[in-house]
């Protein structure tokens, strides 16, 4: 992020509003004195609204010199999701003009730090350039952000979150011909060099020798066979705990032999979003100097159709020795994650968190406003729900009872990959994955049903919203404290 941030303690007067500038005023409705109060009252009168109505919807006005002001009412009782949503909608009118400078003023100056951080996060995150290959389109990023009426402010974590979220969205939006496994691995290697992460990849040849048959079954269908499991290591000074992040990185998902219809194949370049979220969290944790060691494991592959592609009724042996009966080739995500989770758990971290756009069933259950989690430890699932509320990225927990696994019993192998009968596939997938987590390691599975929502979600206005980075960093902080 290249935006310059300036902290100004005083509250601006009317004559300090520059012509043709962009402003956001965060006001307490009980405040008796703020710039251009008459302008706001006149606008509200024309709309047939009262100032108290601003608690639900923002209003944008222009003043005589052409400056734009978006008005937001401060409410300390709102949830973080509602705070983010309210600020995002207030900033939207400003963002459409691609401002290079923005002033956010807080009136009075005792507005909580939570709101200051939220305003900065929303405005910065929605001002970062994202991939756009249209002819003649130039990136217009916010160059200067001025926070006024703030006594003291440390935005280092906020900036780290913006950078992590932007990385996640940028990778996810990138077209599949520009993000093949080969290209993706090269990008990750460059990120590792930039952030001083230890980088190691396990190629298809190595994985075959290791016996990682679940991952290889998916990767063998592509040409070139450039699938790999990438391992990144972030080491914090004096850190005593290690957390593992695991991400599903399917760069394009055709469905394999069980080919997706065109309607459902469109957008499948975003099936690597889980790996992008893991990378975004890793970058945010690194930049905010989070006091924990992080092992990040990325299962990078494509699910293609071809002579070598795996097929229904194949039986493959995973890295941990379990045999798997293939039931549906479009359930490839749990296959690549199975061996990756085994590798992650063998490092014996304090906890594993995996991120994946894994099941359509979770999307049916939750829609695109929430993401769902399943965990082998109830307290970890509870922490995840709390972290979702705290971060403004909402999470709901689903059961992990062992009797769900009866549906995955196979007559020829240790376990079925999935079922063809439908049912709670999001829970079946979690029960399947749990068989590959060794040493009873505390493990949380995050099924990213809200990774793409038309019109944005919470803090983020783009359809691809980077959901999981803010949640993930917040959860990591909670695990460290516990």
Image (cartoon, rainbow, N blue to C red):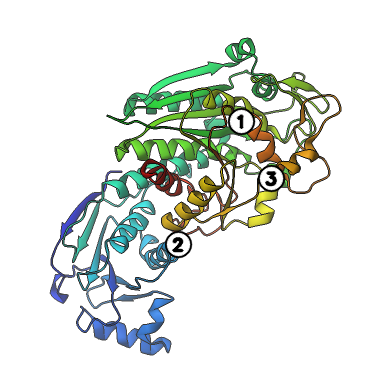
Residue sitting at 13 percent across and 74 percent down? Answer: 15
Residue designated by label 1? 337
Which SS class for mark 1?
Answer: helix
Which SS class for mark 2?
Answer: helix
In primary-sequence order, the first of circles 1 and 2 is: 2
Residue 460 placement, left or right of 336:
left
Most foreground residue, 297 or 6: 297
- Residue 253 visible somewhere in the drawing: no
Residue designated by label 2? 81
Q: CA distance from mark 3 to mark 1?
A: 20 Å
Residue 406 placement, left or right of 291:
right
In the displayed structure, 267 sits above or below 351; it is below
Tell me, yes or no, whether the two marked residues, 3 and 1, touch with CB atoms within 8 Å. Answer: no
In primary-sequence order, the first of circles 2 and 3 is: 2
- Residue 184 visible somewhere in the drawing: yes
**Residue count near mark 1 (Cα–Cα under 10 Å), binned few <14, some 14–19, many ≥20:** many
């Amino acid at each position: 992020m290249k935006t310059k941030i300036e902290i100004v303690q005083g509250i601006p007067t009317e004559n300090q509003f520059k012509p043709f500038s962009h402003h956001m005023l965060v006001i307490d409705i009980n405040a008796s004195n703020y710039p251009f109060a008459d302008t706001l009252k006149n606008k509200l009168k024309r709309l047939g609204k009262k100032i108290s109505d601003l608690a639900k919807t923002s209003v944008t006005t222009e003043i005589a010199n052409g400056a734009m002001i978006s008005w937001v009412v401060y409410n300390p009782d709102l949830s973080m999701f509602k705070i983010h949503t309210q600020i995002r909608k207030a900033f939207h009118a400003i963002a459409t003009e691609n401002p290079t400078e923005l002033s956010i003023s807080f009136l009075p100056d005792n507005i909580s730090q939570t709101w200051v951080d939220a305003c900065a996060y929303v405005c910065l995150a929605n001002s970062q350039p994202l991939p756009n290959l249209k002819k003649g389109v130039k990136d217009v990023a916010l160059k200067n952000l001025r926070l006024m009426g703030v006594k003291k402010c440390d935005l280092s974590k906020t900036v780290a979150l913006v950078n992590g979220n932007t990385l996640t969205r940028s990778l996810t939006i990138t077209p599949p011909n520009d993000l093949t496994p080969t290209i993706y691995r090269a990008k990750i290697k460059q990120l590792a060099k930039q952030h001083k992460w230890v980088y190691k990849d396990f190629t298809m040849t190595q994985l075959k020798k290791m016996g990682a048959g679940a991952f290889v079954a998916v990767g063998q269908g592509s040409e070139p066979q450039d699938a790999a499991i990438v391992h990144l290591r972030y080491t914090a000074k004096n850190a005593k705990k290690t957390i593992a992040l695991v991400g599903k990185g399917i760069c394009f998902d055709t469905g394999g032999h069980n080919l997706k219809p065109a309607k459902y194949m469109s957008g499948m370049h975003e099936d690597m979003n889980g790996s992008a979220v893991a990378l975004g969290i890793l970058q945010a944790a690194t930049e905010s100097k989070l006091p924990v060691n992080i092992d990040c494991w990325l299962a990078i592959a494509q699910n293609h159709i071809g002579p070598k592609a795996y097929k229904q009724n194949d039986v493959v042996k995973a890295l941990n020795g379990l045999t798997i009966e293939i039931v549906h080739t479009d359930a490839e995500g749990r296959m690549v994650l199975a061996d990756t989770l085994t590798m992650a758990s063998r490092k014996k971290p304090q906890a594993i968190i995996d991120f994946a756009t894994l099941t359509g069933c979770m999307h049916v259950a939750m829609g695109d406003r929430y993401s769902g989690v399943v965990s082998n430890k109830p307290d970890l699932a509870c922490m995840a729900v709390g972290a979702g509320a705290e971060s403004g990225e909402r999470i709901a927990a689903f059961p992990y009872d062992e009797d769900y696994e009866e549906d995955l019993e196979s007559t020829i192998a240790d376990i079925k990959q999935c079922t063809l009968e439908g049912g709670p596939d999001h829970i079946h997938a979690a029960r399947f994955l749990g068989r590959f987590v060794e040493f009873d390691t505390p493990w949380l599975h995050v099924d990213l049903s809200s990774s793409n929502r038309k019109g944005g979600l919470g803090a983020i206005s783009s359809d691809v919203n980077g959901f999981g980075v803010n949640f993930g960093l917040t959860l990591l902080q909670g695990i460290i404290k516990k």
